[in-house]
Image (cartoon, rainbow, N blue to C red):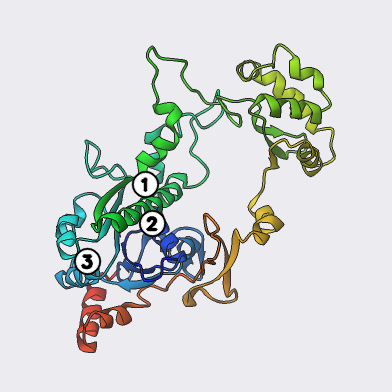
Amino acid sequence: MLKDLKVVDLTSNIAGPGAAAMLADYGAEVIHIEKPGLGDDCRHFFPLHNGTSVTHCWVNRGKKSVAMDLKDPKAAEIVKSMVKDADVFIESFRPGVIQRLGLSYDVLSKINPRLIYCSVSAFGQHGPFSAKAGYDIVAQAYSGLIYYTGEADGDPMKVGFSVADYMCASNTYAAVMTALYSREKTGKGMFIDVPLSRGVLNMNSAMSISLDPPGPGRHRAGNHDFNLNPFGLFKRKDGDFVAIGAINVNLWKKLCMAMGREDLANDPRYITNDLRCINRDNLTRIIEDWLDSFETADEACRVLDSFGVPNSKVYSQQDILKDRHAWECGWLRKVPLPESMKGPSEEIVLAVGIADYSGFKPEYKSAPDLGQHTEEILRDYGLSDDEIHSCIDSWNKSNKL
């Protein structure tokens, strides 16, 4: 689907690399430029398998790895050669760094006016915080996501995984694809600024929207939702949790029927969503008592399914790895490990893809070993074997640990 699309990827960690990996999934050639000796930071994230992070297998799948020292002017010139016939350039340095490397949009767009140039950073390219360093945890904190995650009477709590990074990967992919569509119309490239923090703030719009005069402030609601009820996690006495979302009148009535409590549907304490939010604690006890009437959470979920009430038990990692739906739909795939990570396993299970397309089946390929394609790519751009070996020796020496 994206065959013949060429991407030069100067990103690290999760957000930028994840976006480039999505482009690779759909057929783009992605050349990932990494630091000699160390590589992309995500190669070192816990947990490691045979010395390399399993995170690397997801965020860098399907790419070609070129290890170059971008502080060397020779390396910058090679990147400029790559850009001449590239479609997309993605970088995730702190604002100002890419300019010092001589690889800014102003420079590269003169070489290739059709280039889609995307910068991913913590706070964007402009504004008081643009030079501020930041990662996922900083974006979660700045956006207010942490502020209202956690129990009502407890401390703020971070989300359990790097939600800002993974969401920014999808946002970056969408932004690049939108720009490519625009280029089909105009014939011109463009610059894209994708701030990590903006994406979470946008997702967290309920906090950023202000009424005049101010309305009631949002607050932490633990495993339930501030705006909706019942919409949250309900605990059984065996410690299992069931997620239930009955957000409108029709679903509320269906939940009452599933519980054999049709009387609750017209109870003045619960007849509207705002009243159910006000009387959340009482309603939670009623639902949890009903869940405890079943031997297992699965049995309760089957009853909810029979009435069309949105629900799921809370899955562990092991649960999802054994889940028939995820495997049959292709949401989980076995992908080859990089050569250096093989033994005794040859493959890793990854959750891949964000959509299915009629008439197209993506191919999910292995992530590369560090510098696996350096000689091949440099040769493609006209360097002789002597020049290649000289550059590699120089870059390795300047990046010794």
Quadrant of residue 323 in the image?
bottom right
| Location of residue 210 in the rendering, given as x and y in whole percent from the top left corner | 39, 21
Residue drawn at (70%, 27%), measured in percent from left and top? Answer: 250
Q: Are marks 2 and 3 in contact (CB under 8 Å)?
A: no
The residue that label 1 is drawn on is: 135
Closest to the observer, 192 or 342: 192
Residue for point 37% across, 60% down: 41
For the N terminus, give its image quadrant: bottom left
The amino acid type, in three-letter code, at marker 1 is: Tyr
* Residue in view at x 43 percent, y 64 percent: 60
Q: Is residue 306 left or right of residue 391?
A: right
Badge 2: few (under 14), some or many (20 or more) residues near its Cα, within 10 Å?
many
Q: Secondary structure at mark 2?
A: loop
Q: Secondary structure at mark 3?
A: loop
Q: Quadrant of the C terminus?
A: bottom left
**Residue tagged 2:** 13
The answer to whether mark 2 and mark 1 are in CB contact below 8 A is yes
Q: Could you say whether the residue bearing mark 1 is in a helix, strand or loop?
A: loop
- C-alpha distance separating marks 2 and 1: 9 Å
Q: Quadrant of residue 139?
A: top left
Please provide percent x and percent y for residue 44.
Answer: 42, 62
Rendering coords of residue 19 (x, y %): 40, 57
Q: Position of residue 349 (x, y in %)?
A: 59, 64
Task: Decide which of tag 3 and tag 1 comes sooner along the chain.
Answer: 3
The amino acid at mark 3 is: Leu
